[in-house]
Image (cartoon, helix red, strand yellow):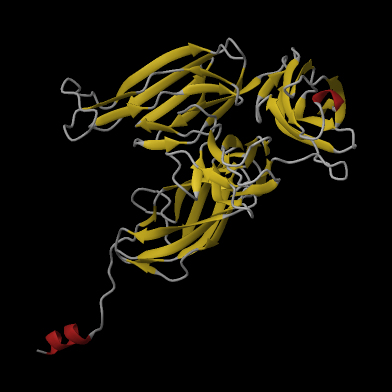
Amino acid sequence: MLLLWIACTEGPKVNGGQPEPVIVPGAVDFGEVVIGTLTDVQIGVENDGLGFFTVTGAALEATSQDFEVLSYPPDPIGAADTGELWLRYTPDYEGQDYATLRLTTDLEDDPETAEDESEVTAQLAAFGVLPRVELEPELLYYSGVTSGTVSTKSFTVASRGSGKLVIRHMELEDPDGVYTLTAPAEYPGEPAIVENGFSVTFDVAFAPLDEGEHNGQVLIETNDPEDGLVSVDLRGNAIDNPDTNVCPVVEVLSPDNGEYILSSSPTLLRGLVVDPDDAMSNLDCSWFANGARLTSATVDSSGNVEDTASLPIGQVEVKLRCIDLEICAGDDSTDVEVVDAEQPLRYTITGGSSIFDYLFIDDDLSVYVNGVEIYVDSDRTSTTLAPIEFEAERGDTIRLVGTDVNQCMFAIDALKLHWGTGQSQNLNSEDCRSSCPQDACYDANYNGPWPGVFLDETYDINIP
């Protein structure tokens, strides 16, 4: 009886099992984050074993200083428990970012396997973007509209720069109640996302009750960090007054923002100018590159401005400026990259029509350039990958190798090779097959093998 009493009163037993720290999820994608803003993500540190462990530190191995560990769990984590870990991403440049998160614990190496049990890791990814809003045109001018009639004009809101443009709010300022703003039927309302390279067209109807002048504007708030509030001016039956002057409204139509241009050939420059006060022949227009004047431009009767010029190598701001008789200037600009034709070119592989589209693979993907592996995804599971960037030359070869590791399904997007925002080349075709009936791409004839290579194709680079 005495021995039984001792066993019952010696206190709680310590679980002798081995703790097993796991970061959940093991891969974190912050997605697109606008430069100058931040995104915080919470993930977990789990104990999938027995006993207890304590996180003693956190470190990052990253391609930039934009990732940050805000906090990790300070208390011991018991069996089946989870601690909170907070991460932050604050981009200061455009492009893809990667990091490896390393957590150290108070565990020691496993003597049986000789494995390091004191450290666990997770992979981080993010994409810094700089969306730009572009209006075309910035002025709607209605002339000679009589009472009782309606004149309708349109403007577009285009997504330029990089990443998705978000239209947060749009408001019509119409003190006289003569304008009607109409969005397209597919427009979801604010906030609305406009994919990079796409635009949305809106109609503005002018229906005056008299012959007088009526002015208004459409205010548009977006996530453009440099020009978040823009407007389209509305001028109905305006009469030119020599005491007041409207400056020319200028728009660069070509080259596109973000376009790559080879230094070996002149660049086509196209623009459009509108001025309700002056004839087009009275405007003095010029093209500039990084502030240096390139050429004087002639404006036709419709306001079109077109010329060609050689641009300097590097990042170039191309600007069109027009000045009227009152010495009032209007300008617009676009940013391009002029690439030295004698140097390797920068290419991007994505799963869509823009250089910012992600790509899907189930399970693994390897990319080779001229036989050298430049990218590998080998996590043995379905993954959405960020755009793949590399340097090569026209005529080099790209080899794509897709491997199906796990039953039931393999899948891959139709991948595109991009050179800047202006040129692209189709690579493989979209493909998906599964041996499991519940999958949408079920194929009764597909039965692996697992692992097995389902794609092994080589392509010649033929752009630019």
Whether residue 91 is situated above or below residue 202 in the rendered picture: below
Where residue 243 sits: x, y (%)? 88, 45
Where residue 219 sits: x, y (%)? 63, 49
Q: Nearer the viewer, residue 424 or 25?
A: 424
Where residue 41 sits: x, y (%)? 48, 56
Q: How many marks?
A: 0
Which quarter shows the N terminus? Answer: bottom left
Residue 444: quadrant of the picture:
top left
Whether residue 213 is situated above or below residue 160 in the rendered picture: below
Whether residue 77 is situated above or below residue 241 in the rendered picture: below
Which quarter shows the C terminus? Answer: top right
Res. 106 in view = no
Whether residue 394 is situated above or below residue 227 in the rendered picture: above
Res. 457 in view = yes
The residue depicted at 13 percent of the width and 90 percent of the height is 2
Task: Give the farthest residue toward the left.
Answer: 1
Q: Is residue 324 left or right of residue 81?
A: right
Q: Is residue 422 left or right of residue 458?
A: right
Where residue 111 sits: x, y (%)? 37, 53
Q: Nearer the viewer, residue 344 or 147?
A: 147
Residue 185: quadrant of the picture:
top left
Q: Nearer the viewer, residue 112 or 386?
A: 386
Q: Nearer the viewer, residue 233 or 177?
A: 177
The residue depicted at 49 percent of the width and 33 percent of the height is 357
